[in-house]
Amino acid sequence: MARLRLVFEGFSEVTLDVGEARIFARHGGSGPAVLLLHGHPRTSSTWHRVAPLLVRAGFTVVCADLRGYGRSVGPPPTPDHAVHSKRAVAGDMVALMQHLGHEHFALVGHDRGSYVALRLALDHPERVSALTLLDCIPISEHLARAGARFATTWWHWFFFAQPDIPERVINADPDRWYHGDPATMGQENHDEFRAAMRNPDVVRAMLEDYRAGLGVDADQERADHEAGQRLAMPVMVLWSGRDDLEDLYGDPLAIWRGWADHLQGHRIESGHHMAEEAPDDLADAITSFVATVERASSLGVAGSREA
């Protein structure tokens, strides 16, 4: 599998046993820590254009493969899918950051990684200084609004949740199912993505992610929301102007106000994979947000980590 030494120049690699799982990550830079979590069907290499920009801006950057994705290996699936739940994966990320010496960190999640980021922030709020969520609303909020339009547009959620059939379909021709453009993605990023999707164990884990999403993950979100649990740290929500989140729901911030006390956000002109398509705009937004939170935290201003 391609190692992306060129685009991740200056980064180190680590593979860490965290109990149930073995997590692969890249890390580099110095300064306040930022953890970047990818979405489906990508790996940590999706951040190859953003991570160096954040390092240059003065941050330590960690890019991790989620449990079962890329080079991270998780346990065998269970009937309740709980070993692939966002709570389990969030625990992996806490252990990884602890191992790397980061008690507190800013957290960025895209797509499926955003659901891990949300769960991590809910379960371990003392760890997260600032939370950035890309192209998402909570899984439970999607399901509460799921009508014919959502089911037609996001049909893959329900297909991936079926037993066995998606594995047979995808593994029959993974290159046709998961197609990407090397010119848009970057050749080495594309090579890593392509190697991962050709691994049946990775495909199974990615599908288990979705199966957990419609069951245990949605249930845990609902339970927290009904109990009045909220995100107390500063939260930034960014969404792609050329994807469908805004078309489905209008302003995503209107939904996130029901979850977050200190909220901001805006549209980025990009397709869904904004880290690959609009890295400068994304890195600028993350840099400005996290730097502002760090300054506020150092001054003890409300909305900082200590607030």
Image: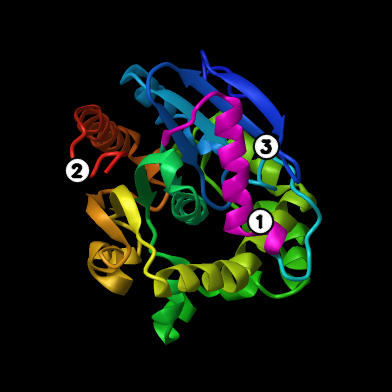
Image quarter of the C terminus: top left
Q: Is residue 103 magenta?
A: yes
Q: Residue at x 24, y 27 (%)?
A: 298
The residue under label 1 is: 206
Q: Main secondary structure of the magenta part?
A: helix
Furthest residue in direction bottom, as rendered? 148
Name the spot of residue 32 as percent of width and height, x first: 38, 24
- Tell me how far mark 3 sits from mark 1, CA to CA: 15 Å
* First-in-chain label (1 vs 2): 1
Give the extent of the magenta segment: 82-105
Name the spot of residue 24 as percent of width and height, x first: 66, 33
Element assignment for label 1:
helix
Q: Looking at the picture, which amino acid does disc 1 mark?
A: Met
Q: Looking at the picture, which amino acid does disc 2 mark?
A: Ala
The residue under label 2 is: 302
Residue 192 bears which disc, if any? none
Element assignment for label 3:
strand
Pick whichever, 115 or 268, lies toward us.
Answer: 115
Q: Residue 173, can we see it? A: no
The residue under label 3 is: 23
- Tell me how far mark 3 sits from mark 2, CA to CA: 35 Å
Circle 2 residues within 10 Å: few <14, some 14–19, many ≥20: some
Figure check: 83 above or below 12: below
How did the renderer colour the structure? Answer: rainbow
